[in-house]
Amino acid sequence: MPRAGLTSDAVVDVALALVDEKGPEALSLAAVADRAGVAAPSLYKHVGSLAALRDLMAIKIMHAMARAAASAAVGRSHDDAVAALMRAYRDFVLAHPGWYALVPLDPLHRGPAAMAEAGRALLEVIVAVLRGYGLDDAAATHATRRIRATVHGFSVLQAGGGFGLAEDVEETYDQLIAMVTASLPH
């Protein structure tokens, strides 16, 4: 019998808290079980394996990222919406670098159907922001890749302490946003 109050979602939340505090390298079923106050075998009633837990975590993380990006972009259009989206995405990565490390590089083609659904939720926010530019499908795909590559690369470098020079990192990021928006039709 599963422990009262312990659900798959609760196990995911415990695992996310662990990763937020100690990083993705601390993630193990034993560590999650210890935090949840149960024996490790008890977790198997809620998650089938560490890989399954990682998938559930990534799905929850991508949905949270999609909500954050959508919330930032709502009510904005064109360059203002792109800038808000890019800032929200980076803010999420900086707030939760351990979580972000669990997001697969290609969620649309990896893991369970729910992984692709979560990846599409985030992708749809970006596509919605770009819709106002009147891009055809191919151009929208290229623009999406430019945004993602820019935000991903900058955010991972920043979260990892890769910007030790004295110049203001925010100014650099503003310049990157300007480069991306300049690449869109006006």
Image (cartoon, rainbow, N blue to C red):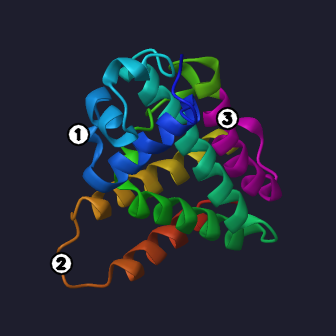
Asked if the stretch drawn in magenta spans residue 126, the answer is: yes
Q: Residues within 10 Å of mark 1 (few under 14, many from 20)?
A: few
| Magenta stretch, residue numbers | 117-138
Name which residue type carries label 1: Glu
Residue at point 71% right, 50% down?
125
Which sits in the foreground, 56 or 134? Answer: 56
Q: CA distance from mark 3 to mark 2?
A: 36 Å
Which sits in the foreground, 145 or 12? Answer: 12
Which sits in the foreground, 88 or 148? Answer: 88
- Mark 3 lies on a secondary structure that is helix
The mark closer to the camera, 2 or 1, is 1
Q: Residues within 10 Å of mark 2 (few under 14, many from 20)?
A: few
- Residue 109 occupies quadrant: top right
Can you give x and y, in whole percent of width and height, for residue 153 in the image? 37, 53
The mark closer to the camera, 3 or 2, is 3
Q: Which residue is mark 2?
A: 165
Q: CA distance from mark 3 to mark 1?
A: 27 Å
| Residue 120's disc number | 3
